[in-house]
Image (cartoon, rainbow, N blue to C red):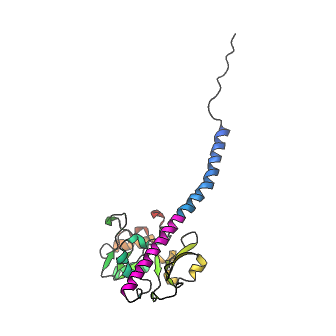
C-alpha cells in the first residue's frame, strides 16, 4: 500500500524572510551614504561652475570699466544682467536661501523690480528662491561679492564666495585669479563678513512671509509672489 505523505512546501520560512530583509537593510545602510556623497559632490561642482561664470562676468565688466570691478559691496546686479539666468546665482545645496528679512523690506520699497530669466522654468513659476534686481541691487543671491578690487588685485584676494558652508561643512570661494576653491567652514568664516553670511534668523518665519504676501502693499511686479514657504530651508527644491 502506497503511503500518502504531505507535499513539500515551496515557500520561504519566516526566518528566511527576516534574513533577507536584514541583508537588504544592511546593504541600503552601506549604499545610501555613498549615493548622498556622490550627489553632494555633483552639487558642489555646479556651485563651483556658478562661481566660475560669475568670475568671467566680473572680468568682462572690468574690461569695460578700466579694470575696475562693480563698486558696491555685495551687489552683483551689474553682472546679473550680463549673465541673465537666475540659476547662476543659486547654489543647489544651500540650506538658507531666498529673500532675507532685509531683502523683503527693500523689495517692498523698490520702485523698479526686475527678475532674471529662469532656467528650465516658466516665468509663472517664479518663487521665493528667485534672485531679483530691486533698484539696481541684486537680492536673493546665494553668493557674496567683495567690492573694491581691480583686475590687478593679488590673485589670492577674495572676490566672491558662498554665503554658507553648504557642502558638507565646506564652501566654494572665488579668488581674484579666477580660481575657485572649496574651503573648510572655519577658514571660510575668516574671509566672509557676518553681513555676507546667511543664518536661519536672517529669514522671516512662515507667519511673517504669509503676512507679507497678504499685505503686499508696496511690492511691485509680483515681488511678493511665492513667499509663503518662508526663506529658510531649500529642502523642497532638492
Q: Is residue 56 magenta?
A: yes
The residue positioned 32% from the left and 66% from the top of the image is 123
| Residue 217 visible in the current orientation | no
Depth check, front residue: 155 or 39: 155
Residue nearest the observer in this picture, 13 or 153:
153
User: Does 165 sit left or right of 79 as displayed?
Assistant: right
**Looking at the image, which residue is at 37% across and 71% down?**
85
- Range shown magenta: 41-66
Vertical relation: 69 (above or below) 15: below
- Location of residue 203 with respect to 121 vertically, above or below: below
Extreme residue in the top direction: 1
- Give the mark count: 0
Residue 176 drawn at (x, y percent) = 49, 83
Q: Position of residue 146 (x, y in %)?
A: 47, 85
Question: Which quarter of the figure is the N terminus placed in?
Answer: top right
Considering the whole magenta stretch, tell me its main secondary structure: helix
Residue drawn at x 69%, y 15% as measured from the top left: 3
Give the left or right position of residue 214, taking residue 183 as reference.
Answer: left
Q: Is residue 73 visible?
A: yes
Q: Position of residue 80 (x, y in %)?
A: 37, 77
Residue 131 belongs to the span the image colors magenta: no
Q: Position of residue 64 (x, y in %)?
A: 36, 85
Quadrant of the rendered structure where residue 86 is? bottom left
Amino acid at each position: 500500500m502506497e503511503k500518502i505523505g504531505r507535499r513539500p512546501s515551496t515557500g520561504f520560512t519566516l526566518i528566511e524572510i527576516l534574513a533577507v530583509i536584514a541583508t537588504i537593510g544592511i546593504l541600503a545602510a552601506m549604499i545610501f551614504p555613498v549615493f548622498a556623497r556622490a550627489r553632494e559632490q555633483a552639487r558642489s561642482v555646479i556651485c563651483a561652475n556658478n562661481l566660475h561664470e560669475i568670475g568671467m562676468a566680473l572680468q568682462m565688466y572690468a574690461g569695460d570699466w578700466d579694470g575696475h570691478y562693480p563698486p558696491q559691496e555685495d551687489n552683483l546686479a551689474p553682472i546679473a544682467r550680463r549673465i541673465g539666468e537666475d540659476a547662476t546665482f543659486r547654489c543647489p545645496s544651500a540650506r538658507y536661501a531666498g529673500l532675507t528679512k532685509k531683502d523683503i523690506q527693500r523689495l517692498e520699497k523698490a520702485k523698479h523690480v526686475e527678475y532674471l530669466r529662469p532656467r528650465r522654468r516658466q516665468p509663472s513659476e517664479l518663487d521665493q528662491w528667485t534672485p531679483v534686481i530691486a533698484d539696481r541691487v541684486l537680492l536673493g543671491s546665494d553668493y557674496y561679492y567683495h567690492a573694491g578690487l581691480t583686475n590687478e588685485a593679488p590673485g589670492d584676494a577674495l572676490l566672491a564666495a558662498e554665503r554658507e558652508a553648504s557642502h558638507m561643512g565646506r564652501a566654494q570661494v572665488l579668488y581674484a585669479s579666477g580660481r575657485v576653491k572649496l574651503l573648510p567652514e572655519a577658514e571660510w568664516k575668516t574671509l566672509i563678513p557676518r553681513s555676507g553670511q546667511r543664518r536661519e534668523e536672517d529669514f522671516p518665519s512662515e507667519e511673517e512671509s504669509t503676512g507679507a504676501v497678504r499685505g503686499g502693499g508696496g511690492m511691485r511686479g509680483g515681488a511678493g509672489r511665492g513667499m509663503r514657504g518662508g526663506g529658510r530651508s531649500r529642502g523642497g527644491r532638492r
